[in-house]
Amino acid sequence: MTPSSADSGRAAAVARATGALDDGTFVADLARRVAVRSESQRADAGPDLHAYLAEELVPSLQRLGFDTAVHANPVAGAGPLLIAHRHERADRPTVLMYAHGDVVNGMDDRWAKGAGPWDVVRDGDRIYGRGTADNKGQHTINLTALAAVLAERGGRLGCNITVLVETGEETGSPGLAEFCAAHRADLTADVLIASDGPRQRRELPTLFLGSRGVVDVELSVRLRDGGHHSGNWGGLLRNPGTVLANAIACLVDANGVIQVPELRPPPIPATVRAALAGLTFGGGEGEPEIDETWGEPGLTPAERVIAWNTLEVLAMATGDPAKPVNAIPPTAWVKLHLRHVVGTDVSDVPGALRRHLAAHGITHVAVSEAVVSPATRLDPEDPWVRFVAASVERTTGAPPVVLPNLGGTIPNDVFADVLGLPTVWVPHSYGGCNQHAPDEHLLAPVAREGLAVMAGLFWDLGDG
């Protein structure tokens, strides 16, 4: 194929992919997938999770020339997984694509837009429905783009594709790591290219190369069995709420700065600082304005959310918040959430908290064992990052934003650490999409550009 015909073929593939949004094909495919109530947080969701893989994705993938197999999860009671292979030539690269077919609870009675969680409705630039942004819309974009390239190349792709779809991401991906370790040979690849999460800004094509990790831990103070009148006993009895408030303030100050040396990350690498230079966060459609004075001093907002650690209060309680009475409560409780970057030692977060509190004379606070998700980050200078970024720029005319890691958390450690792959994520959503909330939606302009970007990327992968 001559350079001019190659360019025209690529342009035709991009046009075919974006045309699927215009002619209704994309929305029809997405509507069929959203209609499957694959809420992994629901105790009886097993049949729906299996149906999403076996009855929806398997036929779609087989039409694209994939061999497919649905597998039981190695964790009892957790949702099934799908592996699909499309192999053309041993001397061509193999790309592992990941997606999740489960969604969070529909919250059916709380939707004000569209027609509820299970019916896709397009209203202007917004395509409403549960999973349209997370993650059914995103993997539908990728499969639509893949189909467009196959059609323009007469059924040939030029590279090998393995697809892995799980159905438990919204409940912490139970069994995913064990499954990938057991099926390592089936998942052998040169790179992971997948889509989840938001763009850095809605108008900016974005790549991210990993994610911050998460550590969940609980603090509790239990001093007695029941409450006691605050007039008769105030000043004589230790107040659990006050003890816990001081414990939190000892761990993170009034400006959100972590006070526990063991929970602070190492210095930000120069390549990470360079990748984040000039990026702005917050203030877009559906997004809050950021608090400029909150968080670690001396860092830009981009560095605070992408390249640093945060310790957040997720929920706390003492007494009866709904019906407070004039009594000193017997207990207090808080759930804390450490978002951490690569290089932070999170092997003993409970121990670090206990030692820090003890050193500051704060007693009577129990610390639970932590639930840990690892952090990952690929070097922005990795050759695969340069390849994908160049492809995106070829399609859009501008270089994408490259985030060394996402501020949130996804199971990227399974691909980076268990499978040992470089990982490049190309998200097709935005921060105001109402992900995990009522009125979740996919933004049509972002979907259109995502279809174009992925069609161009699959074309370029086929060209080597």
Image (tube, rainbow, N blue to C red):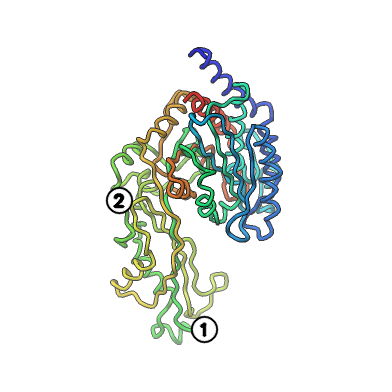
- 126, above or below 47, in the image: above
For marks 1 and 2 on the same chain, the one whose residue lies earlier in the sequence: 1
Proximity of marks 1 and 2: CB atoms separated by less than 8 Å: no
Which labelled disc corresponds to residue 411? none
Q: Name the element at disc 1.
A: loop
Q: Residue at x 62, y 21 (%)?
A: 154
Q: Name the image quarter holding residue 40.
A: bottom right
Left/right of residue 407 with respect to residue 65 in the rendered view: left
Residue 41, by quadrant, is bottom right
Which residue is label 1 attached to? 226
Q: Amino acid at mark 2?
A: Pro
- Say which residue appears at 49% left-offset and 50% top-offset: 411
Q: Position of residue 269 (x, y in %)?
A: 29, 44
Q: Residue at x 49, y 73 (%)?
A: 318
Give the camera-side residue of 366 and 288: 366
Out of 453 and 407, give the one closest to the viewer.
453
Q: How many angstroms separate mark 1 from mark 2 (CA)?
A: 42 Å
- Closer to the camera in the image, 251 or 11: 11
| x then y, percent, for residue 331 | 48, 77
- Disc marking residue 297: 2
Number of disc labels: 2
